[in-house]
Amino acid sequence: MTVEQKTATFIDIRTFIEGLNRIIQRKDYEAWLSNLTPEYISYYSDPALLAQMSEYPVLKRSGTRLTSLRDYFIYVVYPSRQNDRVDDIDFVGEFRVKAITVGAKGDRQILYNLEKHGETWKIGIGR
């Protein structure tokens, strides 16, 4: 991977995340859905996982029960992912990247696991 390739990929990822932020800010579920891999859709549609996530304190306090991917989008993605910022990327493979943000204390957090599908980036589950 050359410096030029990494820089070009970083710019692509940043542009993708900025567009994703706008989609999430509009609560545009259908547009968000079009940016997900089939594996991501399947994983976050699993009733057992949704039930487990419904036990998270913030959801439990509000009495929110996740029963669908749409619920996950509205109650988890929308409140937490509207203003994401990409500070770096880590290549996991030729077509897989981790989009990273750096916190105030310098800690690196994974925003998204992304996969390239043709000319388009999609959110994957990072496996």
Image: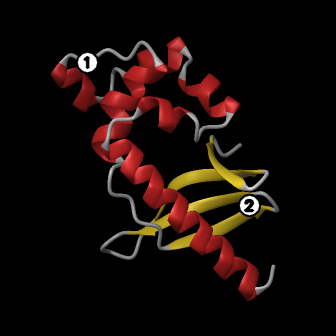
Q: In the image shown, does 86 or 118 lie closer to the viewer?
A: 118
Left or right: residue 63 versus residue 118 is: left
Q: Which residue is painted at 74% across and 61% down in the image?
A: 92
* Residue 126 makes an appearance in the image: yes
Left or right: residue 10 versus residue 73 is: right
**Residue 61 % position (x, y):** 17, 24
* Residue at the extreme bottom of the image, as rendered: 3
Q: Mark 2 = which residue?
A: 92
The amino acid on which the numbered mark 2 sits, given as a three-letter code, is Val
**Residue 82 % position (x, y):** 33, 50
Q: Is residue 21 above or below residue 74?
A: below
Q: Mark 1 = which residue?
A: 64
Q: Which residue is painted at 38% across and 21% down in the image?
A: 71
Left or right: residue 124 versus residue 67 is: right
**Residue 53 % position (x, y):** 40, 25
Q: Which residue is painted at 58% across and 36% down in the image?
A: 34
Q: Is disc 2 placed on a helix, strand or loop? A: strand
- Check residue 15 in the rendering and tell me which mark sits there, or answer none: none
Left or right: residue 122 versus residue 64 is: right
- Gap between marks 1 and 2, in whole Å? 35 Å
